[in-house]
Amino acid sequence: MDGVTCDFELALMKEFKRRHPDEPYISVEQRKGSYCSKQYEAMKPALGNYVKEIITSEGFISNLPPISGAIQSLRWLDEMPGVEVWICSTPLTAWTHCVPEKFEWVEKHLGTDFLRKLILTKDKTIIKADALIDDKPEITGSEDPPLFGRHVVFTQPYNKYVETGDRLDGWFKSRDEAELFVSRLRDGENTFQ
């Protein structure tokens, strides 16, 4: 969800600049690694705490903007015969606001029907699916290999240098692009776009 359907990084950068205008910040393009707080901590320990305060604050998750094209692309995929889209997301450990706000976000942007298709788990390897689209280049957990089939990395600045056979550089601009993506997945072809 974060980094695939909603723009976590952009929202974090804007909120960080708003709350801490005199502190150095990391632009979206400069982000490296999956965990933003660690990169900020490396600059100055207090900055990592500021990031944690922001991402766990009330309203942060529910107000994340959708990534361009994400909502329509999910609908196109979900309308295809033989395709069922589920949203799989890892909640923050400090989940008080995060968990209910992920449900709020899905309902607001995808509607109440998608609420039954939201899976929150700390271990994505236990999710049985044909494919998982995720911004993390490596998904680890209790199942090795994971129960999902293909792992498609959704490109973000912090993962663009990781080599992978399956990658999605952005959401679809047409139903035809969505259908081509699914066709490549089904045929075992590389999904790189």
Image: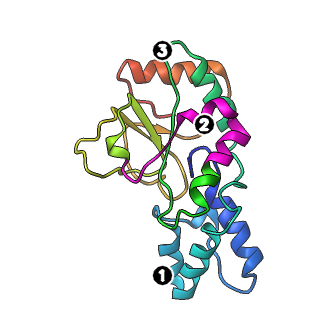
Q: Which mark is residue 82?
A: 3
Sequence-first tag of 3 and 2: 3
Most foreground residue, 99 or 162: 99
**Residue sitting at 61 percent across and 72 percent down?**
26
State the predominant SS element of the stretch in magenta: helix
Q: Which amino acid does label 2 sit on?
A: Leu
Residue 6 in picture, x, y percent from top left = 64, 48
**Residue sitting at 75 percent across and 82 percent down?**
21
Residue identifier under label 2: 115
Residue identifier under label 1: 42
Specify the segment rendered in magenta.
103-123
Disc 1 vs disc 2: which is toward the camera?
A: 2
Sequence-first tag of 3 and 1: 1
Whole-number angstrom distance, CA of label 1 to CA of label 2 = 37 Å
Q: What residue type is labelled 1?
A: Ala
**Residue 25 visible in rendering:** yes
Element class at badge 1: helix
